[in-house]
Image (tube, helix red, strand yellow):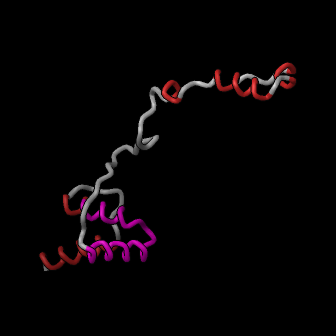
Amino acid sequence: MKALTARDRRADPSEVIRESLRLLKEPDEIFTKGRRGAVVRPRGKTRITIHLDDDVLEAFRERADAAGRGYQTMINEALREHLGQPGDRVSAETIRRIVREELRNTG
């Protein structure tokens, strides 16, 4: 918007308001390329809705609180482990479980 000139400052305020409104664009003109949703979509992540048993969700939340991590991250890691896909981290608990299983199988 342009700066007020000396003439604008002396003008009747209602005239200034009418002129300002005339210069304004309609919302449809301003947001022609606007879209709903997140401004930046995270890569490699998809938002879903999933129904989990209350006790399962509570267990993940308790473990996440104890570890100082996010419960959704822990659920994601558990799903990756189940699928056999490598994740970003392997917890000490997972390593212990694997070692115990291997010792049982070989011992």
Q: Quadrant of the C terminus?
A: bottom left
Residue at x 77%, y 24% (from the top left corner): 3
Q: Position of residue 40 (x, y in %)?
A: 45, 41
Q: Is residue 43 left or right of residue 15?
A: left
Q: Is residue 10 left or right of residue 107?
A: right
- The answer to whether residue 58 is above or below residue 48 is below
Residue at the outermost top position: 7
Q: Position of residue 7 (x, y in %)?
A: 85, 19
Q: In which quarter of the image is the N terminus?
A: top right
Along the line of sight, the residue nearer the viewer: 98 or 43: 43
Residue at x 22%, y 78% (from the top left corner): 100
- The answer to whether residue 25 is above or below residue 91 is above
Image-quadrant location for residue 24: top right
Residue at x 23%, y 55% (from the top left corner): 85
Q: Is residue 37 left or right of residue 58?
A: right
Say how many tags the image has.
0
Q: Provide the residue span drawn in magenta.
A: 54-79
Image-quadrant location for residue 102: bottom left
On whether residue 73 falls in the magenta region, the answer is yes
On whether residue 35 falls in the magenta region, the answer is no
Along the line of sight, the residue nearer the viewer: 98 or 38: 38
Residue at x 15%, y 79% (from the top left corner): 104
Q: Magenta segment, principal secondary structure?
A: helix
Q: Where is residue 93 in the image (x, y as percent from the top left)?
A: 32, 74
